[in-house]
Image: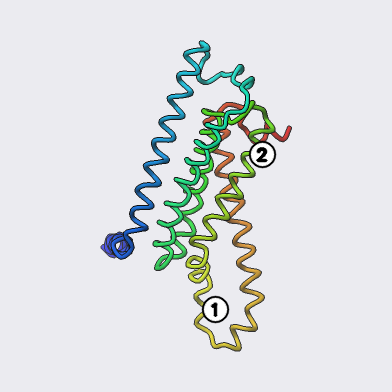
Amino acid sequence: MDHENDNISLLNRITNEFKKSPVNSISVVFGLLIAFFSLIFSIYKFLIFSANTNLNPITIDSISNQSLDPGNIFLIIAFFLSTVFPLAILLRVIGKKHGLLAFFISIPLISLINFTTVFMIFLTPPREISPELFLNAHDLILYSSVIIFISICGQSVASDLLSNENNKDNKTLEKNMGAGLFFLIIVLFVWTQLIFKGQVLLTNTFLPEITHIINSKS
């Protein structure tokens, strides 16, 4: 019963936060719509390309001969930003009252966003496909998503993680400032590694070998 009340309370808080800030609500809905249509359009382009070249959609070797395509670059960027920013805003809302929950939820969410972005690059490659392309893409997507999420909702999550430190007097707080900073750095490192691990596992499970980070590094 208490668990159900906590869930209802969390949903009410999220709803109230979005009611207080219509801009956030519009940004989340509009961003996710752009991401959805970007993904649909990428799948459509990929199917058209496959049909025109008589390729199997899973084994697609001749796609590696494609030249630079600026349209695909903008499509991938639009998809990535349209998923990262709305979910970062949502996590910031959750993190205001439930920082620890937002911290753990962010790991699978960001991993999924990064994986779908790699999937978008596979569907609509910006240039000639190669292992090096996906090696660079994995790193760039990881760093970009982590920086954006930390910038938007890092403060609320960090304050919750350090809530015990904030309850102490000023002298004690100053003494423990270094320890708290060190703790946050360790947490950030582990958090980033978990996101990257999820991103790689999803890619290795669902996408062809050329997109795999292990294959790219070999």
Q: CA distance from mark 2 to mark 1?
A: 39 Å
The front one of 45 and 100 is: 45
Q: Residue at x 50, y 16 (%)?
A: 50
Q: Residue at x 50, y 75 (%)?
A: 163
* Three-letter code for the amino acid on which mark 1 is drawn: Glu
Residue positioned most to the front? 70
Residue positioned most to the top? 54
Q: How many marks?
A: 2
> Callout 1 environment at 10 Å: few (<14), some (14 to 19), or many (20+)?
some
The secondary element bearing badge 2 is classed as helix
* Three-letter code for the amino acid on which mark 2 is drawn: Asn
- Mark 2 or mark 1, earlier in chain: 2
Give the colouring mode of the picture.
Answer: rainbow
The front one of 164 and 42 is: 42
Marks 1 and 2: in contact by CB < 8 Å? Answer: no
Q: Residue at x 54, y 59 (%)?
A: 150
Q: Position of residue 176 (x, y in %)?
A: 63, 80
Q: Position of residue 146 (x, y in %)?
A: 57, 53
> Callout 2 environment at 10 Å: few (<14), some (14 to 19), or many (20+)?
few
Location of the N terminus (image quadrant): bottom left
Residue beneath label 1, please? Answer: 165
Q: Which mark is residue 103?
A: none
Q: Residue at x 37, y 42 (%)?
A: 33
Location of the C terminus (image quadrant): top right
Q: Is residue 67 left or right of residue 51?
A: right
Residue beneath label 2, please? Answer: 136
